[in-house]
């Protein structure tokens, strides 16, 4: 081989080596960039706290119950909402005043003694039914419920808000399924660890636009670019969470956790492939 041919061969080898070296260098920089972005995203997911929202609800059951035992009435729970009217003879022909819309009367009737034990319950708004011994339901009619009792037996009376089923409102299966899906969907997002586009919202901030011109605007642009990058990651996480939400609706938390596990395994495989590509000559 002539000197010229050796020179050309060495030059080609050198050029090829430099290209391989640049390729490996670029691959390493890309891998480090992905690792840094992933670390920042995980940090953001941990530190981000979604805005708190206040929730209010109307309890479906009153925090009080009447217990008839050994010919006596006992009251358990929140006694402040109970007002004893008195022990009234059944044939006394005493007319009780009309209760207001936020209360109703409860009468425990002992026919053997010809006595009514009458109480007023401050229930708040809404209609209630009396649950006797955990099963028998007695509708509160005209804001008054009467329950017959016998000495020697034990009866426990609690009160629960009237549900649509007690009003005999028939809901078709499609409506029931829709209500179930909506409830489970909201439950998933209310109890989940991720809110849609949480990372992008954590990074985005336009409050500095007018501060110290033009530095405030430049800082806003930096955060905007960062928010866009995290928004792309948000799309991937959101896709996983949508699949997990569907699994949660169908089969509960276990199915959602399986979706998370599969997504995590796929992420590990992708990272291993990236590392293998970077290390390949």
Image: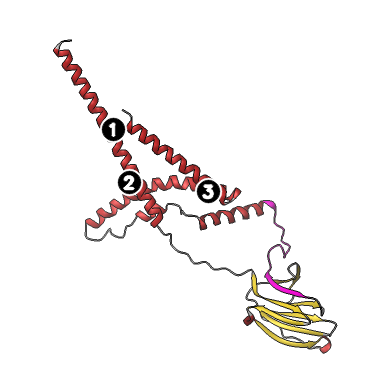
| Residue plotted at (28% across, 51% down) | 222
Q: Residue furthest right?
A: 112
| Residue plotted at (76% across, 79% down) | 69
Please tell me whether residue 30 is drawn above or below residue 142 in the rendered image: above
- Secondary structure predominantly adopted by residues drawn in magenta: loop
Residue 18 spot, x, y in % from top left: 22, 28
Q: Which mark is residue 125?
A: none
- 113 and 55: which is toward the camera: 113
Residue 137 spot, x, y in % from top left: 75, 69
Examine the image and state in which quarter residue 86 appears: bottom right
The quarter of the picture where the C terminus appears is top left
Q: Is residue 73 left or right of residue 225?
A: right
- Magenta segment range? 154-173
Question: In the rendered structure, does residue 167 fall within the stretch colored magenta?
Answer: yes
| Residue plotted at (39% across, 45% down) | 232
The quarter of the picture where the N terminus appears is top left
Q: Which mark is residue 24?
A: 1
Q: Is residue 233 left or right of residue 158?
A: left
Q: Which mark is residue 36?
A: 2
Residue 32 spot, x, y in % from top left: 31, 41
**Residue 200 visible in image:** no
């Amino acid at each position: 081989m002539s000197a010229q041919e050796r020179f050309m061969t060495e030059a080609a080898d050198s050029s090829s080596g430099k290209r391989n070296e640049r390729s490996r260098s670029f691959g390493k920089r890309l891998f480090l960039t992905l690792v840094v972005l992933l670390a920042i995203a995980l940090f953001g997911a941990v530190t981000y706290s979604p805005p708190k929202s206040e929730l209010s609800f109307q309890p479906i059951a009153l925090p009080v119950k009447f217990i008839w035992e050994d010919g006596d009435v006992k009251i358990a729970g929140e006694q402040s909402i109970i007002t004893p009217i008195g022990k009234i003879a059944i044939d006394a022909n005493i007319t009780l005043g009309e209760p207001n819309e936020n209360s109703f009367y409860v009468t425990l009737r002992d026919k053997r003694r010809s006595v009514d034990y009458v109480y007023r319950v401050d229930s708040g708004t809404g209609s209630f039914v009396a649950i006797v011994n955990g099963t028998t339901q007695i509708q509160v009619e005209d804001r008054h419920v009467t329950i017959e009792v016998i000495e020697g037996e034990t009866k426990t009376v609690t009160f629960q808000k009237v549900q649509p089923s007690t009003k005999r409102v028939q809901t078709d299966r499609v409506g029931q399924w829709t209500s179930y899906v909506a409830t489970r969907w909201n439950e998933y997002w209310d109890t989940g660890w991720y809110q849609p586009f949480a990372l992008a919202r954590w990074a985005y901030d336009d409050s500095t636009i007018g501060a110290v011109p033009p530095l405030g605007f430049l800082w806003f642009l930096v955060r905007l670019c960062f928010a866009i990058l995290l928004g792309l990651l948000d799309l991937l996480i959101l896709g996983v969470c949508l699949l997990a939400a569907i699994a949660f609706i169908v089969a509960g938390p276990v199915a959602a956790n399986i979706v998370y596990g599969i997504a995590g395994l796929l992420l590990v495989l992708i990272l291993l492939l990236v590392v293998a590509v970077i290390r390949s000559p």
